[in-house]
Amino acid sequence: MKYQVENGVLLHAAALTGDVYDFVIKAPGIAKKAQPGQFVHVAVPGKTLRRPISLCGFNAEEGTLRLVFQVRGEGTAILATLQEGATLDLLGPLGHGFPAPKEGQKALYVGGGIGVPPLLQASKAAGKNALICLGFRTASAVILQQDFEQNGATVYLATDDGSLGHHGFAADCAKDLSFDVAYACGPTPMLRAVRDLAKEKGVPCYLSLEERMACGVGACLGCATPLIREDGTKYFGHVCKDGPVFEAGRVDL
């Protein structure tokens, strides 16, 4: 079994913005198996369904997971109230993650909003060869910029209102960059833009559709999405079970 149920201990809890929270959880079993781009199922006190939350980071040696999530409903609102020392019932790691870039490759990572956290751990594999383009609504919504920079990456920012960085979208920042492989996580229009840019440059591209996940186990069908087989035929798969990371050519956006 590649995943497990584990009772994690909340070591650190902080608010990054008004509705985005940062948890560090002691969960050595899951941390040892985790891969960038995967997620965990978090049990919410008083609720039946678990919430799928992407891994922002993990440290196998320290046995810790980092979850950065946005309050989007009653379940995540309850999680945001948990205090350090609390126990969290976790199931994971789950899903197919990001493949690492080849040694020496320039790797582009484009994230939008709460799609940014899954890219932090993924980009560590590229080190100083990581080019990070991040998009947010406004300057006060920017998260994790310093974390990417501390990993040695070059970071480009974009905001919808122009209050910080480029006035526009994250994918705009990548148009004049040179890279060998692309990764993206965020809203569908951004994923399309990165896919098209990578195709134009003739480089591989991998997309995380984690934003579409609902129950996280394929039961609710909320994340059903059209996928493309190698022979060009289409079928419906589930982001939570078949992804959340897909090679760009496999997804019908």
Image (tube, helix red, strand yellow):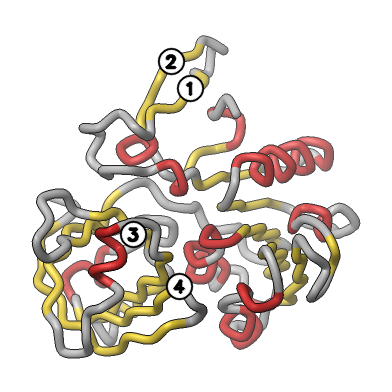
Q: How far apart are marks 2 and 4 (CA)?
A: 35 Å
List x then y, in percent, for residue 199.
76, 36
Identify the mark nearer the N-term, 4 or 3: 4
Q: In this view, does 147 lie to the left or right of 235?
A: right
Above/below status of 252 relative to 110: above
- Residue shown at 85% from the left, 63% from the top: 167
How far is mark 1 from mark 4, CA to CA?
30 Å
**Disc with the residue nearer the chain's start (1 vs 3):** 3
Callout 2 crowding tier (Cα within 10 Å): few <14, some 14–19, many ≥20: few
C-alpha separation, residue under disc 1 versus residue under disc 3: 22 Å
Q: Name the residue under label 2.
A: 235
The reply to whether discs 4 and 3 touch (Cβ–Cβ < 8 Å) is no
Q: To which residue does mark 1 refer? A: 226
Amino acid marked by disc 3: Ile
Q: Which of marks 1 and 4 is nearer the N terminus?
A: 4
Which is more N-terminal, label 1 or label 2?
1
Q: What element carries label 4?
A: strand
Kind of residue sitting beneath label 2: Tyr
At a point 70% along the width and 59% down the height, the residue shown is 108
Residue at the far right in the pictured view: 176
Q: Residue 20 carries which label?
A: 4
First along the sequence among labels 3 and 2: 3
Packing grade of label 1 (10 A; few <14, some 14-19, many >=20) is some
In this rendering, the label closer to the viewer, 3 or 2? 3
Question: Mark 2: which secondary structure?
Answer: strand
- In which quadrant will I find the C terminus? top right
Q: Circle 3 sits in a helix, a strand or a loop, which is it?
A: strand
